[in-house]
Each structure stands twice: as C-alpha cells, then as structure tokens.
Image (cartoon, rainbow, N blue to C red):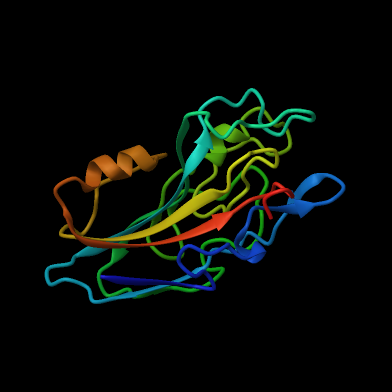
Amino acid sequence: MKLEVRGIEDGQPIPERFAFGVYSSTDHMSFGPNKNPELVWDQVPDGTRSFAVIMFDPDVPSVADDVNKEGRTVAADLPRVDFFHWLLVDIPADTRRIPEGEDSDGVAPKGKAGGPGPIGVRGVNNYTQFLAGNPDMGGTYCGYDGPCPPWNDEIIHHYHFEIFALDVDSLGLEGEFDGNAVREAMKGHVLDSARVTGTYTLNPDLR
C-alpha cells in the first residue's frame, strides 16, 4: 500500500494546524487548530474488506512526574510508551481518502464522541487519561487529537500515521475501545499497511 498524509512529509516536522498544542512564548503552550490531516491511500490489496487508521506517538514519558513542570526537564533517557492520538476502524473498503478536518476541526474540551463518526468508527485516544484530572478538560476523547508533547521534554516526538487493509468488514469493537484493543483485534487480519511519520516539539530549545 501507499499512504500520503497531505501537508506532512515523512520524517519532517508536523505543521501547527494539525496540532492540539502550539508553542507559546508566554505560557509554553496554547491550543492549536487541531485539524486531522488529509489521508490518501492506494495500491490496496485484493480481498480488502475494510481499513483501520492508527496514529500514535511512541515517545511519551512512562513517568509523568516532571512533565510540564517549571524548572524541570523530562530526561531523554526516560523509558517511553505509546500514546494513541487517532483510532478509526471499520472504514469501508471503497474509501481512499479522509479529508482534512473531517474527523477533527479544533480542540473539543472534554472530547469528541466515540462510535460511528464521519468516516469509520472512532476509538478512545489517550488524552482521556492525560486530561482526566483537569476539571475543564477531563472527559472521553475519541477520534483525532493532534500532537501536544511536554514542553520541557529533551527529545523530539515522532508521530506515526498508519493505514491497515483488513480482510474483515468489521473488527467487532464496540464502546470505549482503545489502541491496544485495535491492535489485538487486527491480529491475523492485516493484508497490508503503510506508514508516514512526522515530528513535533514544543520545547523552544529543540525547535
């Protein structure tokens, strides 16, 4: 398969219009446009019955003690974990494009609804956990929410956009399913896949 993420070149910085958080010289971070980028794919294998989209950041600190804290930094050698930013499953087999802004067009405090969305079925992204203690923002976040890495992280984060061609019409996922559930449900059903990776940082020393 071939995947194009329009506006994002493989291995290059992600434009701010696709970000949940953008750099601010006064407050470190402010909300960004948070638009999902346009995805276009082709060279689809025979037998494809649906698609799934996953976007994740493998560079998220495994311990959040120093995240976004004045006078501290998130050490480069800290173990990292996956943070899911976008989960869409059961995308119809005749689909070849997700338009820019179709699944997200702005930050939605307390999150967007799960279940069937404009295209496919939305899973729960990890902003649900990250913002759980925030009275203004806490909620269930589904669909696309873009990059917003710690502004004091010593490393640049990488964001993998992936498309999977599947041999089933549906992965059978219901309710508030997460990225690990999607990966588990796809096992044995992936005919082909493609990936584009962008980078992003809010650390002014790395920009």
Q: Nearer the viewer, residue 17 or 58?
A: 58
Residue 191, horizontal then vertical, whole percent: 16, 60
The N terminus sits in image quarter: bottom left
Q: At x 58% / y 43%, what residue is drawn?
A: 155
Q: At x 32% / y 39%, what residue is drawn?
A: 181
User: Within the image, what quadrant is residue 183 found in?
Assistant: top left
Q: At x 56% / y 52%, what residue is drawn?
A: 145
| Residue 140 against residue 159 in the figure, above or below | above
Residue 142, horizontal then vertical, whole percent: 50, 48
Q: Is residue 105 left or right of residue 169?
A: right
Q: In this view, does 35 lie to the left or right of 203?
A: left
| Residue 103 against residue 39 in the figure, above or below | above
Q: At x 45% / y 66%, what residue is drawn?
A: 10
Residue 182, horizontal then vertical, whole percent: 31, 44
Q: Nearer the viewer, residue 198 or 102?
A: 198
Residue 98, horizontal then vertical, whole percent: 44, 71
User: Within the image, what quadrant is residue 138 found in?
Assistant: top right
Tally of numbered discs: 0
The C terminus sits in image quarter: bottom right
Q: Residue furthest right?
A: 26
Q: In this view, does 30 lie to the left or right of 102?
A: right
